Image (cartoon, rainbow, N blue to C red):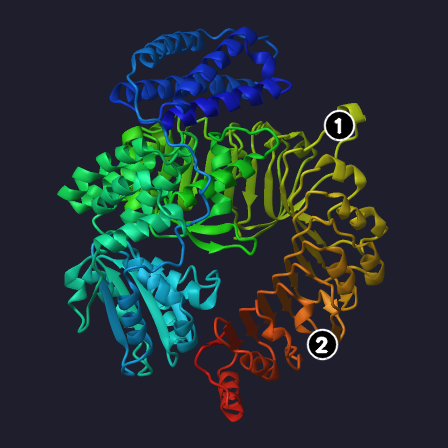
Amino acid sequence: MAAYAAVVSLMNNLEQIGNHPRLSSCFDDNQIQSLGEKLAFLLEFVEGVGIASEEVKGLERRIASAAHAAEDVIESRVVDQIHAGFQDNGPIFSIDLQMIMQGMSLIQEEVAKVEKERPYQVQQPTRHSRAGRFSSERNFMLGFDEVHLQLLDRLTGGTRDRNIIPIVGMGGTGKTTLAKHCYEHHLTKEHFDVRAWASVSLDYNVRGLLLELLSCLIGSTNKVVESTVDELGEGLHKHLTRRRYLIILDDMWSVECWNQIKYFLPDNNNGSRIIITTRDLRLAYQFSYVMSVHSLSVEDTWILLCHNVFGHEDCPRELKDIGKIIAEHCQGLPLAVTLVGAILRESSMTREYWEHVAQNIGSRLNHDMDDGLRAILMLSYNALPAYLKPCFLYLGIFPADQEFSVSRIIKLWVGEGFLKPHVGRTLEDVAEGYMKELIDRSLIVVSTRGLNGKPKNCILLDPVRELCLRIVYMEKFLSFVGTGSTPAGTNSERHYVALDSIADKHKDPQFFHAMESSLLARTLICESPALLSCKSRLLRVVTEVYSDSLETTLQQVNLRFLAFESICAPIGWIRTYELPSSISLLWNVQTLIMDGNIEEVVAPSEIWEMPQLRHLCFNRIRLPEPPASDDDDLVVLRNLQTLRTALDFNCSEEVCKRMPNIRKLGIFYDDFSGEGQNNSWYCIDHVGYFAELESLSCCFHRVPDRDDLVQNLKFPISLRKLILQDCELHWDDLSVIGSSLPNLEVLKLKCQSVRGAKWETVEGEFPSLRILEIDSCYLIYWFSESSHFPRLEKLVLRRLYRLNEIPSEIGYAAILGNISVFECSISAAISAARRLKKDCVIRVGFRKEKEVAEFRAKLELEGLRSYGLQIDEL
């Protein structure tokens, strides 16, 4: 909803200007107060609209336009003041702003009239107490049991030839769900050496597909990201050769796509399988076997709908008859049932609203299934509260069926300014709650979760993104440049730029025209690095840009989110770069990300004058001492939550007072041995003062006295994630860490973080630990019992060349389901293989082919099975 986003954004802007010590004096107080009152009235109307008539939609568009116009005037005034060096001309009464406010007054009158004369309508459904209890990821295969078993049988049985299994059916019939359940089934995990999944979609890119498959097989693809299609294909072919693999190619639309990728998938004559989900019968009939997915029966549809809405409870008697009518209207489409179930689950459970749902989806689904599915999706959108609509529409910037980072989108939502503040909660917490609501309503699908159970990456299904783009186009919420399959020319204030490479920019006249003419553009989101050339002075969100110098970018003083890819230089890598003092002119900046070609950034003292900072993410940043001040005049970065990676971080008590709400901190010490330097200057023991700290990464590159360092290491009890590198602790020191951090869930011990050959764990340590990773430590003997890590879920061992074996009991803890052993001794890898059991994923990797052969030979010698193991040549 553009109106809600525009009004809330402007109200947030007015509050930030009012809190600014110099900008607040540039505006007439009475004028700003009057504008705030009008906005509060209009926001109350927008929030309570519910299901809007055409007249109300027209009012919403006018409200959005007026709010945008007012914001343009105000922010232009702010930019003028900053560029002029805050000339003290006193408060200015803006004639332009007054004219806009007069227009708002007319809108207010019409709103009051509409509210008075509008007939009674079905109210927006209120959030029901059951919301969130039954997610769209529920493991529920009603109506698919037979075809599910049939597909599992074809995957794990049959001939040794490479089989290609197309699953064909119309949109919404559950093809992807069926493939996903088989992909994640414990039988396939045990049967195949490696598995990989790629989402194809209509506007597929072969290079992107190959990278997606490789990322499933080798993890990070940073080393091959610049490779050509042929090089990527050869790498994929090599990685799959001699392995029994399962490949899922989801949502493939054409025979041409298959023809472009099939040569990279070898036939190893070992029972490898490829599943293709498609709507295209021509593609499906290319193969000897076709599996069709049909719609659910009427009875199964009703049972599935009840499960989505009520879980294991019964449907109330007064809703049963109308509920069955709704189920019939879903035409047996599982996606339709899931979406409608989410709508009803979030409602107030009144018969009146259920009748409204039945009326809105019935006739259209009966006429045409695709049209009916769009009607259900539109109903899902209309049922969203006003505050969720702009968050949902913003997701249109991401391609369908491709993962997006929840952390990234939350920062972008905050930067856009359309989140309404809540007392006692950070904007990030508010955004996280909004994300959960969209997931509960089945508009977003969680693809991966973090160990705390929170969504880490999500996707938009193809039909959902189609709806999203349609509404984006109608409401002029975003515009897209440089993509052939997305709407363009919407005259929006936000621009999403998707170019294959920066070299193509000058070849795209649409891109050039949009960027040169959009003087009021607010957002520039690029899929690949692009030169910042937009003439707008009001940009607030910019991602993946590079520049001849940072000074050029800092002319955009209205920025709130800046993800800087790189700075042009005669050599590709810049060792040290000093941020100019003009960085403080970014009066409202919240997120600064600079992790491209700059190794170390030196921040000026002015960075302490940027109170809106929330996230500072650098390869390494050297912070200056905070300015001296009386306690009454203390400069505090109260909003700062993320700081990484701080170089030679002075964790003095004074610094801790200046950033009291840090949640994620990365620090890198490289100058302990500096001439005349006092080690205590760094005050590492003061890290414990950060009472809100949840994630801490420490690297100590050159530390002369390790024992003193260990004694000074004190961590806050709030810590959930700890990464240590080059600390050279003793294994006994981990007992102190394990017993003093009851909330610790993730512990990563990286290169030389611990020294000594023997580790004996003790009961009572690490009671909440879920992930343990040990990398490049001199460990030979490890003694532990199953009760010592009661919640351990994942164990990762890397480059432990001398480790004899993994403790025998630890592998049998009931909750431990994922063990990875990479570049360790053969005996350690064998000890992991002995622990292979149901619902446990074990990956073993070696650098050399002869090591893989030796490992397989020892498996056979001990009579251990090799299928179910994922054996990689790294």
Q: Quadrant of residue 614?
A: top right
Q: Quadrant of residue 90?
A: top right
In the rendering, which numbered label is found on residue 419? none
Whole-percent x and y of residue 737?
Answer: 75, 59
Asked which secondary structure carries label 2, the reply is strand
Front residue (pair 531, 166): 166
Q: Is residue 621 above or below residue 75?
A: below
Q: Which residue is mark 2?
A: 783
Front residue (pair 262, 562): 262
Q: Sequence-wise, which precedes: disc 2 or disc 1?
A: 1
Q: Residue furthest bottom?
A: 861
Residue 507 visible somewhere in the drawing: no
Asked which secondary structure carries label 1, the reply is loop
Q: Which residue sits at x=71%, y=76%? A: 783
At label 2, the amino acid type is Phe
Q: Which residue is mark 1?
A: 634
> Foreground mark, 2 or 1?
2
Number of other residues with Cα within 10 Å of mark 1, as a class: few under 14, some 14 to 19, many 20 or more: few
Residue 311 visible somewhere in the drawing: yes
Whole-percent x and y of residue 620?
Answer: 64, 49
Q: Is residue 269 above or below residue 812?
A: below
At label 1, the amino acid type is Leu
